[in-house]
Amino acid sequence: MGRFFGGSAYLRAMAALHFELRHTDPSSSARAGLISVDHGTIETPIFMPVGTAGSVKAVSQQQLKEDVHAEIILGNTYHLYLRPGLQVLEQAGGLHRFMGWDRPILTDSGGYQVFSLANNRKLTDEGALFQSHIDGSKHLFTPEKVMDIQRVIGADIIMAFDECPPYPSDYAYAKKSMALTHQWLDRCFGRLAETPDKYGYSQNLFPIVQGSVYPDLRKASCEYITSKGAAGNAIGGLSVGEPEAEMYQICAQCCSLLPADRPRYLMGVGTPWNILENIALGIDMFDCVMPTRNGRNAMLFTSNGVINIDNLKWANDFSPIDDSIDCAMSNNYSKAYLRHLLKSKEILGLTIASVHNLAFYLHLVKEARKHIIAGDFMWWKNEEVERLKTRR
RNA sequence: GUGAUUGUAGCUCAGUUGGUUAGAGCAUCAGAUUGUGAUUCUGAGGGUCGUGGGUUCGAGCCCCAUCAUUCACC
């Protein structure tokens, strides 16, 4: 235990999240910065691998560090609350210790599950009544309850409990939903102020902008969220099926309204080209299941474009998966071999595909950062987007 | 050699009393996937029903022959 968890991160003095803006691109809204939390410093723009249930599926914590070069990962409040449950997490001393990950963690609040589990939900002003997908048991999530759970999980960055309205949503519904999210936000901040940090490091609440695709609602939401003075702000309710152009428009609007001196987090996005476009609009943080989920299902994102490694044309291609990124798995295993593993449903295939895709995503945001600092970001981005989108 | 058994998609098999264009699972090929209910989902291609004859308005199914298969007994 001591060898793994006795590191200085736990001994450092507790401090709230600090964001340092290092460079701003003159020809776009792209920025390069540093986010500091008690478990470490994150270079932005950053991509955060999704580890829903205390695990980035098929990828070990060691691989996340050494191969993927992940700086921060996600956990999910809804899933961790159902399994292993609060008793285990509390006794473990929080999620970091439980899973053996000493770098920063962000937890999503379960707000998205209100949307994705819509069949079994009942929404009221009080909160959301869910039915567990595991055993059918009923649970009430209120903003207070969700803050309490996230205290027990102990992530460095925790998300407000919101409602993510589906696309399309009519104006009346989107407006009502946004108002509910704002009410819940007040209760999240209220509860957080009443409860202490549990494990000797600080937790930072990010509120979430909603408002669907309606500019006046997004404006109102941005203003409301900004008034909270949070350490960072998130944009939710995008990449839920709307056209890409619409996502970019809303994202651009939100970035222009949210404070420049705080990190901006675009939730759930996206493809590699989505990420570059949104960096140009002023986003600093991303998360998405795409590199892992799609990787497990044979879709690879590479420096030369998108590959469906299942396709017959790769059966005899013994070239590396991708030799232009810093990842031993991508460099040393061939396309033909990975195709064979996935076709044969070998477990190693899931790992190689996931590690490669994640390493590629991390490589991409690091390249973006370099070009922001070098001053040629837009030129680079435009070339890169075309190449990344190519189907090979 | 005798008796029985089984021959239907690449594989394992359904197929009603004889009745539209013969189905399934797996495999193959392709598509989907955006704050993970995802080892998932969707679609496509693929058949001279062992072969040859017969009965019938109509045969995968009934009859005869033949070839192959598996088993049992000499």
Image: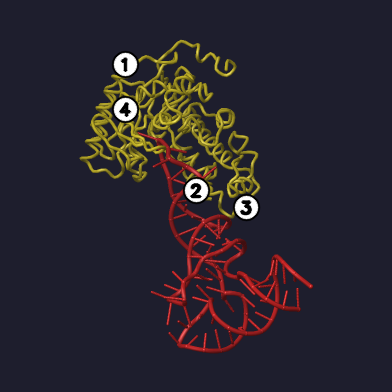
Chain colours: A yellow, B red
In the image, taking residue A278 as reference, residue B74 lies left or right, namely right
Give the residue at mark 4. Answer: A258
Q: Chain of mark 1?
A: A
The span from disc 1 to disc 3 (Cα, nearest Å) is 57 Å
Is tag 1's residue or tag 3's residue first in the polypeptide sequence? 1
Q: Identify the mark at residue A5; answer none if there is no mark.
A: none
**What chain does badge 4 belong to?**
A
Q: Is residue A217 left or right of residue A346?
A: left
**Category of crowding for the residue at label 2, using alpha-carbon neighbours closer than 10 angstroms: few (below 14), some (14–19), many (at least 20):** some
- Count the marks: how many? 4
Residue underneath mark 3:
A315
Q: Which residue is mark 1?
A: A193
Q: Position of residue B60 (x, y in %)?
A: 53, 76
SS under mark 2: loop
Which of labels 2 and 1 is toward the front?
A: 1
Against A122, residue A389 (above or below) is: below
- Is residue A25 visible in this depiction of the protein? no
Whether label 3 touches label 2, CB < 8 Å: no
Looking at the picture, tell me which residue is in the foreground, A14 or A5.
A5
Up-down relation of residue A3 to residue A25 (above or below): above
**Image quadrant occupied by the N terminus of chain A:** top right
Q: Which of pointers 1 and 4 lies earlier in the amino acid sequence?
A: 1
